[in-house]
Image (cartoon, rainbow, N blue to C red):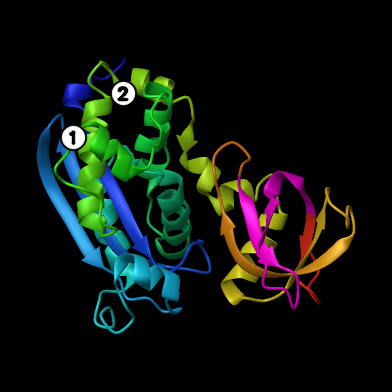
Amino acid sequence: MSSSLSDQTIVALDFETTGKYPLTSEICEVALIKFKGDQVLDRFESYVRPLKGMTKESEKVHGLSLESLKNAPDIKDVLKDMLEFIGDAPLVGHNITFDLGFLAYEFERLIKTDFSSLKRSHLCTSYLSLSLWPKLRSHRLIHLAQHIELNLKPNHRAMQDAEVCMLVFLELIKNFNSLEELLEAQKVDLNYKYFSISELSKSKKFILELATSCENLKEVEIKYSKGSKKNQWRTLNPKGLVLKENELGFFVATDPGDQQTKRFMLSKILEARIPNKRL
């Protein structure tokens, strides 16, 4: 039975992070807004203390620093509070694939209790706007806010960006009656399984090797089905592992001695191994 959108509780989500890529970077600020229709039910926000450092690029974007976050809560405690806050509500975010990549990894790594409520399809204002407002010149959050003439603008801080996302979302869904209709209109299934290392490892065992390499910032060897080194073992330095929907995930790495980052599509990686460790 379909559920009316006006009766559906949804949680808008936004993260700020210490870098671009999950596994090698961390969440450093969290904001959640629980709403039903145009009524805000509750809010949750927290800083998170990073343990792996902060890129200068990220610090410049959101203005948070290791010094300002040194007394912030541990990510494990924040995740527990988030899980309780979200309950069984679907999430909506702008470019939520970025957030889901961090969220799925941290939940599976740190939370041992059940979090099955998150293992569903979620919503993205970027994908929805691409589907419903295809003629817009840009689908960045700031341009969507301008399109609907919002006074509030995204500012690369979690709570304000989550609120802008919620307001854009409410405009996008005006002509929909049910969550099921909206998910179909989105055209892209943002199911948790695409962002779960444990789920992907059932069919792609090399995912575990890539994840271990990223976690420890250690070299990894892969066989790739494309390029000048096709089907040959090549050594790479990990920068991160980006999980996206429908086989679009990729491994980010550099060749030894080279600073140029390269993307290796997971669908084209044949094997992976950590040197001196057998698969």
What label does residue 149 carry, if any?
A: 1
The structure residue drawn at horizontal position 31% and vertical position 66%, both measured from the top left corner, is: 62
Q: Secondary structure at mark 2?
A: helix
The structure residue drawn at horizontal position 28% and vertical position 26%, both measured from the top left corner, is: 172
The structure residue drawn at horizontal position 29% and vertical position 48%, both measured from the top left corner, is: 13
Residue holding disc 2: 179
CA separation in Å, label 1 and label 2: 25 Å
Mark 1: few/some/many CA within 10 Å (<14, 14-19, 20+): few
Give the residue type that dot 1 points to.
Glu
Give the residue type that dot 2 points to.
Leu
Viewed as shown, does residue 58 lie left or right of 89?
right
**Above or below 15: residue 199:** above
**Above or below 155: residue 4:** above
Please state, as top left, top right, bottom left or bottom right, where the N terminus lies in the image. top left
Q: 3 or 156: which is nearer to us?
A: 156
- Could you tell me residue 273's position as x and y percent? 78, 65
Q: Secondary structure at mark 1?
A: loop
**Above or below 7: residue 45:** below
* Span highlighted in magenta in the image: 249-270
